Amino acid sequence: MNILKTATDWAKAELFSTPFFILFGVLFVLASVGFWQLGKTDMAKAYIIPTLVAGILLMTIGLGLFFTNKSRITQFETAYNSNAFAFVESELTRAEATLKEYQTIVFKVIPLIIAICSIIIVFVDKPIWRASMITTIAMLVVILLIDGTAHARIDNYNKQLISTKQELKN
């Protein structure tokens, strides 16, 4: 029963962190509105669309993760009560797949995209390109910050699942 509490606590912690995607998404949308209303220079006007797109993407990510994890909490108890070992096995498989995705996407691809955007900023002189690259970097930094803490949580959860699996085998 301890792993059920651990799984529920993990999902609740995810529910706490995913609204930060939504919060930053709203901030990006508000920045877009601010650039639209107050932007006088070409550079300021160039930020309108990129910040709007980044805001919508962050809100979409946040809402998707929120509803996925919210429904997962109610499914945990049912799955655990029907077959505890199968529950631990499926959660372990999911956690390990998620950890692999973090290693590839969050810790390799996102920094690579940030580096490419930085290079484009140096070599391209058009305001729309610069605004797009700066906004992309800002959005990816937000994702790195939030997913960095999520990675630590799922890594800890994965270790607890491994321990529970060993206990259930014995």
Image: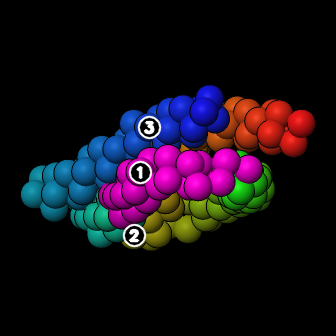
Q: Nearer the viewer, mark 1 or mark 3?
A: 1
At label 2, which amino acid type do we have?
Answer: Ile
Location of residue 124 with respect to 16 vertically, above or below? below
In percent of width and height, residue 159 lies at 77, 35
Q: Between 148 and 98, which is closer to the camera in this rendering?
A: 98
Spatial separation of the CA atoms under disc 1 and disc 3: 11 Å
At label 3, which amino acid type do we have?
Answer: Lys
Q: Which residue is mark 3?
A: 12
In percent of width and height, residue 107 lies at 72, 49
In percent of width and height, residue 58 lies at 39, 57
User: Which residue is found at the position 60% from the left and 61% from the top?
Assistant: 117
The residue most toward the top is 2
In percent of width and height, residue 64 lies at 40, 62
Residue 70 is a magenta residue: yes
**Which corner quadrant of the image does residue 56 belong to?**
bottom left
Q: Which residues are magenta?
A: 59-85
| Circle 2: element type | helix
The residue most toward the left is 37
User: Which residue is found at the position 60% from the left and 33% from the top?
Assistant: 1
The image quadrant where one finds the C terminus is top right
| Circle 1: element type | helix
Crowding at mark 2 (Cα within 10 Å: few <14, some 14-19, many 20+): some
Specify the label residue 128 is tagged with: 2
Spatial separation of the CA atoms under disc 3 and disc 2: 40 Å
Location of residue 120 with respect to 30 vertically, above or below? below
Contact (Cβ within 8 Å) of mark 1 with mark 3: no
Q: Which residue is mark 1?
A: 74
Residue 30 visible, this orientation: yes
The first of marks 1 and 2 along the sequence is: 1
Crowding at mark 3 (Cα within 10 Å: few <14, some 14-19, many 20+): some
